[in-house]
Amino acid sequence: MAAGESVVHGETIRIRGQAAARLLLGVGLWACAGAAAADTPVAADDPACPSQDFTRFLQRFADPADDRVRLRYTSDPLEYEVPMHTVRDDHEGLAHTHIALEQGGARLKRFSYRYLAAFDLFVPSPVSRDPVALERMRAGTYNAPTRIEAIDDNGQRVTFGSDDERDTYTFARRYGCWMLTRASNLRD
């Protein structure tokens, strides 16, 4: 009887060992999939790519009434570039800029422009709700420079503002659409 118990006990240990190995493999695959999917658009009830044409995509991305496109098509983490002197006092001899990786909800705050279709303008978010600025837009006296330029076969750079006061955003083609991959605020 003792020999039979030994076989049953040995079989139980083997089965538990296999189960533990499968569990570890599953956890490992889950972790790898999570790392690979960090930059993948979320699929909840988010919209499909709103346009293959970049200008139309950007208009939807900056829609003040619907942030689902921004949520889905902003990299997580997002590279956020600022002047080094805004990060460190002892910046002499270092690179001129510092890049931080913004994650989660914080990354969404880095794109602060909205597209107002009624005026065909991209404006800073606070301006989109400012009655005085809206009146200037109606009168055609509001200046909101926007420059869109291709940076390679798979990218676009968008600059809002003038040369001395501007924000720059880099978009790359990923997953069949455009993704915001970097926000740069290099104002002094």
Image (cartoon, rainbow, N blue to C red):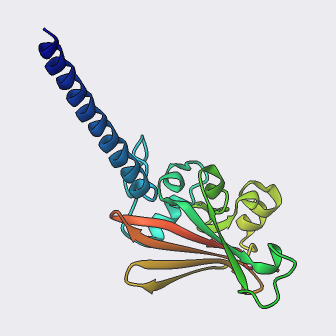
Quadrant where the image shows the C terminus: bottom right
Residue at x 76%, y 58% (from the top left corner): 126
Instruction: Where is residue 122? Give x, y as percent.
Output: 63, 68
Closer to us: 160 or 33: 33
Q: In this view, does 178 lie to the left or right of 165?
A: left
Q: Is residue 124 left or right of residue 11?
A: right
Q: In this view, does 137 lie to the left or right of 45?
A: right
Closer to us: 163 or 174: 174
Q: Give the image quarter of residue 166.
A: bottom right
Instruction: Where is residue 178? Give x, y as percent.
Output: 43, 67
Q: Residue furthest right?
A: 89
Does residue 109 appear in this view?
A: yes
Does residue 187 appear in this view?
A: no
Q: Which residue lies furthest to the front in this view?
A: 2
Closer to us: 6 or 59: 6
Instruction: Where is residue 86? Give x, y as percent.
Output: 82, 74
Residue at x 85%, y 81% (from the top left corner): 90
Residue at x 14%, y 21% (from the top left corner): 7
Q: Residue furthest bottom?
A: 93
Q: Is residue 48 above or below residue 116?
A: above
Q: Give the image quarter of residue 127.
A: bottom right
Instruction: Where is residue 93? Give x, y as percent.
Output: 78, 91
Closer to us: 111 or 76: 76
Quadrant where the image shows the N terminus: top left
Q: In this view, does 74 lie to the left or right of 12?
A: right
Q: Is residue 166 above or below residue 93?
A: above
Residue at x 27%, y 38% (from the top left corner): 22
Q: Residue furthest top?
A: 1
Q: Is residue 25 above or below residue 154?
A: above
